[in-house]
Image (cartoon, helix red, strand yellow):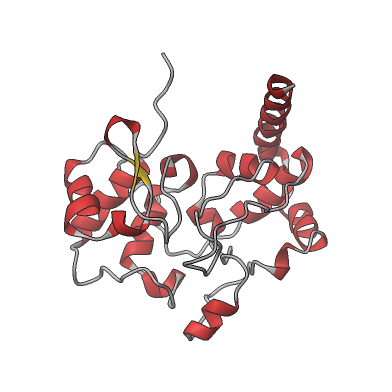
Amino acid sequence: MRALLTVTISATCLMAMVSVSKADPAAGQAVFKAKECVACHYTEGPAREKTIEDQLAKKGPELWYAGDKFQAEWLAGWLADPKPIRPMKFNSLTEENAGDHPALGAEESATVAEFLMSLTSGEVEAGTVKVKKNAKGRQIFTKKMPCSGCHQYTGRKKVIAGGRSGPSLVDAGVRLNADWILAYLKKPEVFKPVKMMPVFVGLLSDKDMANVASYVGNFKPKKKK
């Protein structure tokens, strides 16, 4: 039974990923509204948050730059079979993430993913980050700056290390666009003017930020031989 369930879920995700290139952004927007996703996520920029109260009033992350942030195939698959990205509930440091995000059908996830991937900020320059094993980026992430204090990641010997207050970065390279990671570090006021994460502008050089983006962008599961 478990094997059958795994095959069914995998097939659903595959259908979503194959269909995403054929989907229609306008149709995806209609599904997004019909499913009341707008109750938790806003999709029109720029950032609305001005105060901590504004941030705490949100039920879920903003998605107005989703096309900059996410990998299209991952997004379609996640919408069909959502798994918690944050160990803790959104905007909470004490309550566990219940993992109860609604799932969409394969066709719906493909159309919604196409809509979300059409949303960009105009602030991300494509092709600026070369994703690779980056020793300098690792040093900054794990030692020089407190990144690993808030974000989980796969450490040595495949052990999950790091904190739980921020989004998990385990296999983040499958989910996130490395060019967006760099833009987010360089221009936090554009994407999240109010947030718990420290601002590294003035603490890290642009080159250091690129190294971190390169390092995090390489967080991917090892390919099976």
Q: Could you tell me if residue 144 is visible in this image?
A: yes
Drawn side of residue 208 relative to residue 148, left or right = left
Residue drawn at (30%, 54%), measured in percent from left and top? 148
- Depth check: give the residue in front, 97 or 101: 97
Q: Could you tell me if residue 129 is visible in this image?
A: no
Q: In the displayed orientation, state which residue is furthest to the top.
A: 225
Residue drawn at (44%, 50%), measured in percent from left and top? 168
Drawn side of residue 160 relative to residue 91, left or right = left
Q: Is residue 73 above or below residue 27?
A: above
For the N terminus, the image quarter is: top right
Q: Give x and y (percent) for residue 115.
A: 67, 54
Q: In the displayed orientation, state which residue is furthest to the right.
A: 34
Residue drawn at (30%, 58%), measured in percent from left and top? 149
Residue drawn at (18%, 63%), measured in percent from left and top? 205
Q: Is residue 126 above or below residue 56?
A: above
Question: How many tags in the picture?
Answer: 0
Drawn side of residue 150 relative to residue 11, left or right = left
Drawn side of residue 179 relative to residue 63, left or right = left
Q: Give x and y (percent) for residue 223.
A: 42, 22
For the C terminus, the image quarter is: top left
- Depth check: give the residue in front, 187 or 103: 103
